[in-house]
Amino acid sequence: MRWLPYLEWMGRREEFLSLAKGGLEQIDPISPSQHLVLAYRFFWHGDWDRALRLSQNTISLESNKDLHGMHWLRSICYERLGMPQRAFEEILTMVEEEQRVAEMKKAFDEEGLSSVHYYRFEELRKHRSYGRAQYPMEYAEAGEVDRALECLQEMWSLPLEGWEHAPSNRLFDPLRSHPKFEELLRKQKLPEEAIQKHLTLH
């Protein structure tokens, strides 16, 4: 399994997903960490339904832990599945201040889900376990392409520590048509075949 990041960076999505699905057959039913890891694997590759099921298992098994990352993941899954109310409910679970909840409900009622992306991002930033790794994803999801690319450039200039930064991440879809995205890809010195796969992923 140590070569899974290689498959992602090479754009070999089907091979990656095949191995991830194989992991479902071996998962320990009472291991929250295994459910969490697989939830993120499917999330990054746009399998929203599997990511939701696995993240719910994680939450059920880790009910007393800080699970803002799982609720953040679930809010995006529901948004991508065209379920804005469910997405908003997941965001609310990340918020503790009553005044902030009231502000978010008002914004959602008046302007829809896009109006609360900022709140989701701010709540995420409050928790030190979720750092700058999420920034390019959240900016991309909010439609702030230039800021997402700036953060991605910073991430890709650092030693690669997480799979979430692989160009195969479906949250980077809004960035693929931007010339800067291709420029950043080429700086990674990937094979041309891999670059083309990442640019045309859909």
Image: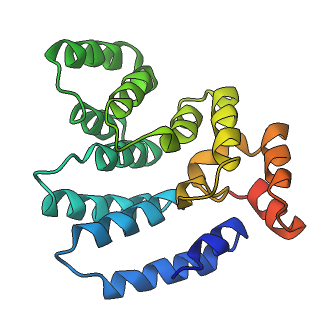
Residue 130 point in image, percent of width and height: 39, 42
Residue at point 29%, 63% (across, down): 53
Is 96 placed left or right of 120 in the picture? left
Looking at the picture, tell me which residue is in the foreground, 109 or 141. 141
Is 138 displayed left or right of 10 in the figure?
Answer: left
Question: What colouring does the structure picture have?
Answer: rainbow
Q: Is residue 34 above or below residue 199?
A: below
Identify the residue at the far right of this view: 192
The answer to whether residue 16 is above or below residue 138 is: below
Is residue 109 found left or right of 21 in the rendered image? left
Asked whether 53 or 152 is in front, the reply is 152
Residue lying at 31% horizontally and 36% vertically, measured from the top left: 127
In percent of width and height, residue 120 lies at 37, 30
Q: Residue at x 36, y 34 (%)?
A: 124
Q: Is residue 161 left or right of residue 64?
A: right
Q: Is residue 100 above or below residue 167?
A: above
Pick the residue in front: 1 or 197: 1
Image quarter for residue 96?
top left
Q: Give the residue displayed 49% in from the left and 42% down from the top.
A: 134
Residue 103, horizontal then vertical, whole percent = 27, 12
